Image (cartoon, grey):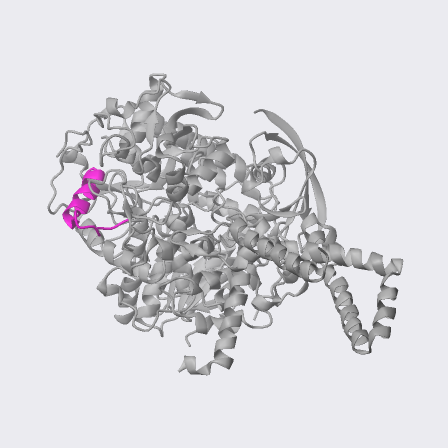
Amino acid sequence: MGERTVEFEVLRYNPEKDREPHFQRYSVKCREEWVVLDALNHIKETIDPTLSYRWSCHMAVCGSCGMMVNGEPKLACKSFLRDYPGLIRVEPLRHFPVERDLVTVIDDFVAKLARVKPYLIPKPGAPEAATGEYQQTPAQLKRYKQFTLCINCMLCYAACPEYGLIPNYIGPAALSLAHRWNEDSRDGGRAQRQEELAATEGAWECSFVGACSEVCPEHVDPAAAIQQIKIKSTIDWYKEHLMPWLNK
Amino acid sequence: MAEQVGRRPHVRPITSEWIFRHPRYLRYMVREFSCLFIGAWTLMLVCALGRLSEGPEAWAKFLEGLKNPFIVAFHLVALAFAVYHSTTWFQLTPKALPVQLGEKFLPDGVIAGAHFAAWAVLSAAILYYAGAF
Amino acid sequence: MPHCELSFATGSMETVSADVAIIGAGGAGLRAAIAIAQADPKLRIALVSKVYPMRSHTCAAEGGAAGVIKADDSLDHHFNDTVGGGDWLSDQDAVDYFIREAPKELVQLEHWGCPWSREPNGSVAVRPFGGMKKQRTWFAADKSGFHILHTLFQTSLQFPSIQRFDEFYATELLKEDGRIAGFTAIEMRSGQMRRFDARAVVICGGGAGRIFPFTTNGAIKTGDGMALAYRAGVPLKDMEFVQYHPTGLPSTGTLLTEACRGEGGVLVNKNGRRFLQDYGMGPETPLGQPVLKTMELGPRDRVSQAFWQEQKKGNMIPTQWGDAMLLDMRHLGEAKINERLPLVRDMSISYMGVDPVTDPVPVRPVVHYMMGGIHTDIKAATPVLGLFAAGECACVSINGANRLGSNSLTELLVFGRRAGLSALEYLQSGARAAGEAALGAAANDAQGRVRELMQRSGGKETVAGLRKEMMHTMELNAGIYRTSEGLVDACSKLADLRRRYRAIELHDKTNVYNTDLLQALELGSMLDCAEAVAQSALARKESRGAHQRLDFVDRDDRQFLRHSMAYFDSAASPRIDYLDVVITKSQPGVRDYSGGHE
């Protein structure tokens, strides 16, 4: 493993200087094993300290460094230069407003996460913390485990054409998170989340493009979560309207 | 409230070029596009029922009309789209209907396979009763 | 519903009024916020962080959180493991409080939905961890910190009294008459300075591992919380104790959890020998059957030091990123690795090109955690009235001279809560708000200092340049083993760097999300923390825990059974003073990690 000079085209935007975003070229001497993030850090340290971007853990667990790399939503810390033989174009994550350079405005996403009530709403009769462990079998854990893995990186929002075209759509990560809580054996809050999930901009906006699951770096499979929500919602609706005696 | 001096978040416009940005989006649009052909074929089926109810003469004329090369071509394309749609649908079904057995989930292939198998059996049954063999 | 008020003070700085403000929204900050919100929903809580909460470095912790829960364990065991592991520098009253609260906090987290890994009967599973006599480390696969952080963050969303200020960088604490009054912070997206008024402030800003070049720590671990308190007159305690985690990836420095060894992984040198047995941690235990508290389950300081010694003998494997040892997990089998160490496998393959299922993984010690930090008492209170601290940025001290793995995630919960409640009690005791005139003036001064940095021209230093020099001297002179010459060199170098810091000129002088400015401010924090580390290390003429001197190889309880206290001086090096360690039940003894111990 040695060195290679890689050409980067990075989107720049400084609202105080630029009317519009524009691309800037950098020629960077890179080590073979680097990821795009390493190259960006090298650019910032040795070539252009004005470049702004978010990053922290460098191990794909904090979710900070989501960007478009050659048109695909990727984590910069997990985009290996060895997979990109030619020019590498880096842009801010699509479908979010650009604040500055590669930094996006993610207020919409954060608000949507909060809207689905993503916390444990205890079932009636649930044990108190003072009484000891809240038991859960490995099988019960397995039921919802994969949906807990979301690192909030928003690659799924960048990949989802529904979110791009219909900004009110609550989106894959928010829905997966709601599903994670709905499927947790300790939770009893499905009814309370239903309003958000069954809304027009909720699960029903999804037309199962499936791009979200394809780009998810943690294999959460939000598309699966959303279809499962649709089925459960439908069953709930039928029960409520056709078998109201169940709901006393 | 202080105005946010200097901030001017830039919203990038969305155009329909998104369809061509990656093969997965094109495949999705083809899948969705199939609904046009399936819809058209359904209309044709409704017409067929209508002709059938008008008696043997009308029905025979309808069947003659079906031999038109454009109509045949339409049927072939519609069949291709329907097969594509059904295939993708069955492949995605396991995502919507996970079956958990203990700590493991039934493999996707089993669930999808069961659907394909049912499809094959039903198709064979219909073709049999239609006199195809 | 309580809501932090925004207003315009005299001049143009927008002011946020809260009852209590928390700086840092990782595990400790979130836990503090939740504790206050639950205890008194009417209090206005401003939760201020330079990153969105889910980016906090708590997310990178992997192995687990310790708490006595199983029948074969006892509070005494946890106490003794922690005090011994800390080489008797831990305050034993604090450790006693910690180990008692630990299981309650972990159970509370479970009731908030944390997806702990389970035993077949549904009870929480525990795994072996370094330096612990019994298994007591609760875990969620190998992403325990991630799950704890997200559980806390999501739980915090149900409290309307917690108002978040994401991506605000706190620059200076404001005091009046020796008590806290608030702080100034830059709203990063606009570059505008805001004044936060709060009668109680809790600092949960994390550690400062980024002062070293090879670290598991993410970009954000720059010691800003420590520096805030330090510059406001609070001493930084035990800063010389920097923990090296034995198993970091040589290429990126990122962490492979201690759980790799807890599950049975072993460390070998270039000859395939499990060399730890040559450094007091033997005899060699059977492959795949780790025995608690010996061999690969020895404490982190001993294992890292063994690496260093072994490297000196030329027994390490040279890689393009420096020498490494091998972490062999092949005998665990693919099923176990996938179930218990999936992140480890993913990282090894992605970043090293090595699959632990089929090959041993090169690893080496990297800086991981700072035992030292903001001096607090057992209730998380600093000497400044109304100012509290918790988490890695604080030093109570429970970790002493060396922290046991999986104690720190629990520490976030126990002391995060404790700090929140202490802040609450302080407010209820009738804390007065500060006067507007004094606050306004102080805030304007703070703003002036940042403006000066931004507008400075003709400076010949750069952020990246000074940072690199700082990291180099820390690695060379303040690493696993230290010498008098090296530390003197580091101290003078860091003093020089602090001076040259005033000559930095920024390349980016704009306002919107200016990360050149942000990194410059972070560098300022790091230089102050680094100098505290080096000076404290120079003054401690003994070897204890993670602080090892080649010129003073023995532990000296007569002179140094005391905490180092570094006091900030803006124009000179910190003054180092000492504070006795609280000893209650456990007199300093020998740390025995050999298989022969009881």
Q: In which quarter of the image is the C terminus of chain C?
A: top left
- The segment highlighted magenta reads C66-89
**Residue B52 or residue B119, whichever sits in front:** B52
| In this view, C329 is above or below C532 | above
Residue C78 is one of the magenta-drawn residues: yes
Q: How many marks?
A: 0
Q: In this view, does B7 lie above or below C212?
A: below
In this view, C551 is above or below A143: above
Residue B32 position within the rendered picture, expressed as x and y whole percent measured from the top left: 70, 60
Is residue C173 in sight in this rendering? no
Seen at 35% across and 53% down, the residue is A138
Front residue of C579 and C450: C579
**Camera-nearest residue between B12 and C145:** C145
| C144 lies left or right of A7 | left
Which of the image's four quarters has the N terminus of chain C? bottom left
Residue A241 in view (yes/no): yes
Q: Position of residue B48 (x, y in %)?
A: 79, 71
Residue C242 occupies which quadrant of the picture? top left
Task: Write the residue at 24% across / 24% down.
Answer: C277
Give the camera-side residue of C434 and C284.
C284
- Report whether C51 appears left or right of C77: right
- Where is residue C358 shown, x and y percent of the image? 43, 29
Task: Please give the name of the residue rendered at 42% of the width and 60% of the height, measured from the top-left corner.
Answer: C153
Residue C392 location (% of width, % of height): 34, 48
Q: Does the magenta stretch include residue C219?
A: no
In this rendering, position of residue A27 left or right of residue C464: right
